[in-house]
Amino acid sequence: MAGKVLDKLQRKCNTPEQALGAVITELRLRRKWSYQHVSHLVGCSDTYMNGIEHGKRNPAFKILQAIAHVHGIKPSQLLAAAERKYLKARK
């Protein structure tokens, strides 16, 4: 597992992409995994995963499925959590 893993990380949620990235980051941090480790598990580059977590990249559906799978949830749960986070940030 490469990279330092923080206990908590605040991400902006001003866009749906940022909210999705924040949810993915939170799931990763709960397991104390680095984003490099998750990128290896889902089969994408570290740079791509970092971009997803920062809301700068939109994950392909296949990657979104893989991210959900490694965290033991359904893609719909991942998207629903991101939607809630985005709507909460807009209030």
Image: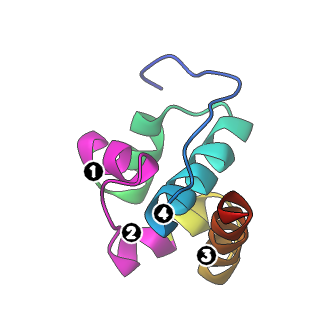
Find residue 5 and report its horizontal and vertical position in percent. 57, 22
Residue under numbered circle 3: 79
Q: Earlier in the sequence, mark 2 or mark 3?
A: 2
Horizontally, residue 25 falls left or right of residue 35, namely: right
Residue 48, numbered label: 1
Q: Quadrant of the C terminus?
A: bottom right
What range is drawn magenta here?
Answer: 46-65
- Which kind of residue does numbered mark 3 sit on? Leu
Between the residue at mark 4 and the residue at mark 2, the CA separation in whole angstroms equals: 20 Å
Task: Give SS at disc 2.
Answer: helix
Horizontally, residue 64 falls left or right of residue 86, namely: left
Between the residue at mark 2 and the residue at mark 3, the CA separation in whole angstroms equals: 13 Å
Task: Give SS at disc 3.
Answer: helix
Residue under numbered circle 4: 15
Of badges 4 and 2, the one in the foreground is: 4
- Which kind of residue does numbered mark 2 sit on? Ile
Q: How is the image coloured?
A: rainbow
